[in-house]
Amino acid sequence: MGLVRFNEEEWLQPEPDLAARARGFADWPQGVQLTREAAAPGRELTAMLGIEGALPEVALACHEDMCLLTLPEGDDQYRLIGAAVAWPSDWHPKDKLGLPLRALHAPIAGYEEQLATGVDRFMATLKPGAIYGRCNWFIAATGERRWIADKTPAEAFAHVTAGNAGKTLFVRSERQTLRRLPETGAILFTIGIYVEPLGNLGPDNIAMLASAAQNLVAGEGDRRGAPAYAHSLIAFAERNAR
């Protein structure tokens, strides 16, 4: 899972752009999806952070999108019971609400075979007070923080070349954290979105991404469109290294 432990000060971004968050939710109200089961954990979270309201108000006041998961009585998997997501990475909360973890991650190649058991064990043993996090990355054809794919990868990356990849490819990172709320036992999953043009990264990071792109043309890479951009990214990195 690639998780590391965070302290309280490292948990959430300290100076969120609140105007950007407000615009994000105003422009995409379907990003807020709640079940009745989300009410009590939402209130617990607002009390913890000193914010009035429920889960949507917390997400408005933070840089991070917020999801709540609980383990229903008699079930063996955590389920998504609430989401306040302004900047999704190509997913719709309405399609995921109520689903168990394995179904939530079903589109991710290799999840069931390589990660599902470990994730289930981690969720079951996560203690209140502990905060864990990880980062992932994607290559996108847009610098917008809300990324909902509306074209095939071949269409989305058709304009990308080795010459313009520094400005037309965007590196998208999710800084994810997990912590259990002590009173309700719900698990809070936060997703902080960061997007930069490829050309804004340092040479070492560009080279790392180029190396990774060579391995992304199968499995999960296919789902995220790697075959449509990998050649241009690798060629751009080679030019940048000269």
Image: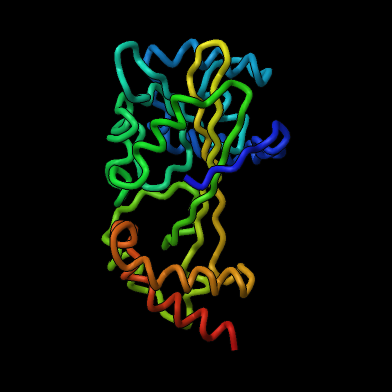
The coloring applied to the image is: rainbow
**Number of on-image labels:** 0
Q: Which residue does the image show at 49% across and 80% down from the upper left?
A: 236
Q: In this rendering, is residue 158 above or below 131?
A: below
Residue 199: x %, y % from top left: 57, 72
Q: In this rendering, is residue 174 above or below 6?
A: below
Residue 94: x %, y % from top left: 32, 30
Q: Which residue does the image show at 57% across and 82% down from the upper left?
A: 240
Q: Which residue does the image show at 45% across and 57% down from the upper left?
A: 138
Residue 16: x %, y % from top left: 66, 39
The C terminus sits in image quarter? bottom right
Asked whether, in this view, residue 225 is left or right of residue 210, the answer is: left
Q: Which residue does the image show at 60% across and 38% down from the upper left?
A: 63
Asked whether, in this view, residue 27 is left or right of residue 192, the answer is: left
Residue 73 sits in which quadrant?
A: top left
Residue 115: x %, y % from top left: 37, 43
Which residue is more in the foreground, 235 or 114?
114
Q: Residue furthest bottom?
A: 242
Which residue is more in the foreground, 118 or 184?
118
